Image (spheres, grey):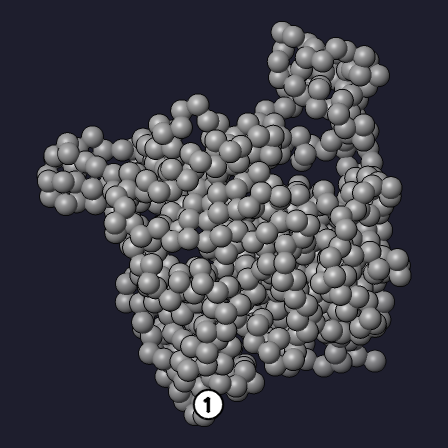
Amino acid sequence: MPEPVFRIAVPSPLRRLFDYLPPGAVAGGTITPGQRVRVPFGKRQVVGVLVEVVDHTDIPAERLKRATECLDREPLWSETERRLLDWAVDYYHHPPGEVYQTALPVLLRQGRVARAAGIQRYRASEAGLAQAKGEPRRAPRQAVLLDRLRSEPEGLTAGALATEFVTWRPALARLQERGWVESLEGSCLPAPQADPEGERPLLNPPQEAAIAAVADHGVGFGAFLVDGVTGSGKTEVYLGMIERVLAAGRQALVLVPEIGLTPQLIERFRRRFPVPIAVLHSGLSDGERLCAWLAARDGSAPVVIGTRSAVFTPMADLGIIVVDEEHDPSFKQQDGFRYSGRDVAVMRARLSDVPVVLGSATPSVETLHNAQLGRYRPLVLPERAGTALHPDLHLIDIRHNPLTDGLSEPLLKAAERHIAAGGQVLIFLNRRGYSPTLFCRGCRWQSSCERCDARMVYYAGARRLRCHHCGADRRLPTECPECASADLAPVGQGTERVEESLRGRFPEVGLVRIDRDSTRRKGAMGDLLDEVRGGRARILVGTQMLAKGHHFPEVTLVGIVGADQGLFSADFRAAERMAQLIIQVAGRAGRAERLGEVLIQTEFPEHPLLSGLVEHDYGHLARGLLDERRETGWPPFSHLALLRAEAVDRDAPLAFLEEARRLAVGYGLPGVEIWDPVPAPMEKRAGRVRAQLLLQSDQRSTLHRLLAGWTPQLEGLKTGRRVRWSLDVDPGEMF
C-alpha cells in the first residue's frame, strides 16, 4: 500500500498547501487533520498544520520530503472550526499557512506542547498582611507594591503587575527576601468573583424583549442586531442572553474591538457570572494567552472575551457569539491576513449553528442593509436605561465665534457652567500632539516627513517633531531649515494644545488628557480613568479612545472640536465614520440622572451630516447614506477587492499593478469592473511608494470567481518580485 500524503499549511506567503510524507516513526492513519506537524521547509524546520490527507500527489517521489514529527495527540480544532479556517482561506484568498498561524497562540506556533503550565502569582504573605499600610516607609515602591498585593487575596500575575507598575521586579524581589510576599502557581484564569446576591439593574421592556427574542429563537443559527442608543444598556442585554446559554451548559464568545474596552467589560462579566472567564488580547503574556486559549478549547472557560483574533479560538461547546460595537473599524485587520472579525464571527455562527448578536449604537451601513433584507433581526433599544435622557445636540458656528487655541467662547462658557454645577466636561479632538505641523512665517516651509507624504506633528512638551504614519522622530528645529528664520509657529490644534489652553482657563480644576501618547506607559490608562471616576479630574481631553464603551456618569457636557475633518473626504465611508464617531462621543454625556449637553464646533452648520444628526438621529442619517450608496453603486450594493503594491522604486508598484490589470482583463469575466492602477492617496509611506488597483462587482460570487484564478497567477509575475503586494477583500480603508 502506498503511503498517504499529508497536505500541510506551512507558514509561507504562497497561496497553496505543501505535500509531505508522514513522519517515519508514526503510522499515517494516526495523524488527522487539525494536528500540528513539524516539517523541513527550505533550510529550516517549521511548524505547520495538517489540513488534508490524500492518496496521491503530483510531486515526483524523489522530491517529496517527510514530515519530522507530529506535535499533537489530537486535532486542535473541531471539524466545524477547521471548516471556518478553510472558508477564511478561500474567501480572503490568503495563504493558508498564514491563516492557520493567525488562529494559533504564539507558543503553539513555535512548537510548544498544547498544555498550559501553571501561571505564577504573587500575593502578600501572613507577615506582609501584618505590616502597616505604607510599610516599608523608606522604600516607597515596595510599600505601594505590598499595599496592592494585600488588596488581592488571590494574588497577581507578572502580566498584571507589569500593567500597573513600570518597574516592579526589584521591589518584589526585596519583599520576597523579607518574607512579606510569597509566590504560588495556579490557573491562569482568575477564580470566579461573582456575587449571586448582588443587585441587578431593572430591565426596561425593550431590553427584556431583546433577551427573550434570542432565547425564543431556540437552537440553530440566527443573526440579531441590537440597535441601541448610547447608554441604552446593551451590555446588560448581552449578559441576559449569555446567562441563558451558560444555564444550558454551553459557552459564549464575546468580541470587542479594542483592548482598551476589555477591562471594564471583564469586570461586569466577572461580577455577574460565577464561572472562569478567559480573556484573549495582545496585552497578555504568551503563557497567559496559551492558557486562556486552551481553557476555551477544553470547555473549562464558559465565557471567552477577546479582540479580533479571538474569533478563531476553538471552543468545546459554543452556544452564542456576541460582537460588541460591530461597526468599529478595529474589527478589520489592516495588514497581513486582512480579515474582518465581525464577518468571520457571522460565518462561524452559521457553521456552528448558533445565534450571533451584533450590537451598536451606530450600526454600519452594511449591517443595517442586512437587517432591511431580513438577514438580521433588529432588536431596537430606543431609550437610555434607567432615568437617563438623550443629550441635547447643538452646533456652534465658529465662523462667527473666534477660536482661542481651537476653542470657542460659547464652548468655554458652557464648560464653566457645567463645572460650577458639579458636572464633568469632555473635550474631544481626534488629533494628537500640540499642533499638526510647524510653519515658517518667512518662507512658508512646513515640517514634512522625509519618509512619508505627511506633515510631522509638533509635540510641545517633548519639543519633538513626530510622524504618526512611520514613527519618525526628530528634535524641534531652532530655525527654518530652508531660510534660517527663527520665526517658526505651530499651526492647528492637537490634544496637547487644547489641554494647555484649558489649564490656563481653569487653573484650579483637575484635568486629564487621554490619548495614545498619555497612555503609553503600562497602567496609565487605568490611572487616568480612576481620576475621572473618582471625581479628581473635572475636565477630560482626549481622542477617540474616549469615544466608546466608557461610562462616565458625571460627564454632563461634551464638546467636539475639529468636527469638520471628515466632512469632505474622498473615501465613500467618511460620512458614515464621522457620524458614528460624533454619536459615540456625544453618548458619553448625560448617562446618569443629569441631563447631558453636546456642543459641536463647525464652520459648516448647514452641512446635511451635521444638521441631520442634530435634527433627527443616526438611524435617519444612515438610511440616507444607504440611499446614496445605492445610487452610486458602492458597498453594500457592490463588492470590492483592492490589490495593493509598494516598493522603494517609484515605478515598480504601478508596473506590477498594470501587468496584474491586463491579466485580470484577460479573463473576460463580465460583471467585474477593473479600475486602472493609481497611486495610493498617501503615495509615500515609511520610505516606500504605494499604489493600488480596485476590482468591483455587483455580484460577490462573480468577483470571487475571478480572484480564485487571478491571485495564484500574481505570484508568478516577474514584476511582482520587485514589490510587496497584498490583496484586501472587502477593504475597510480605500488607501
Task: Give the residue at x 62% y 7%.
Answer: 138
The amino acid type of the residue labelled 1 equals Gly
Left/right placement of residue 474 relative to residue 73 reads left
Residue at numbered disc 1: 671
Compared to residue 595, the image places residue 136 above or below, namely above
Left/right placement of residue 576 relative to residue 340 reads left
Task: Give the residue at x 23% y 33%.
Answer: 477
Residue 462 horizontal/vertical position (percent): 36, 30
Where's the N terminus, which quadrant?
bottom right
Residue 702 horizontal/vertical position (percent): 52, 87
Return the residue nearer the eye: 232 or 144.
Answer: 232
Compared to residue 661, the image places residue 461 above or below, namely above
Compared to residue 716, the image places residue 317 above or below, namely above
Residue 8 horizontal/vertical position (percent): 68, 68
For the image, the number of numbered tags is: 1
| Helix, strand or loop for disc 1 | loop
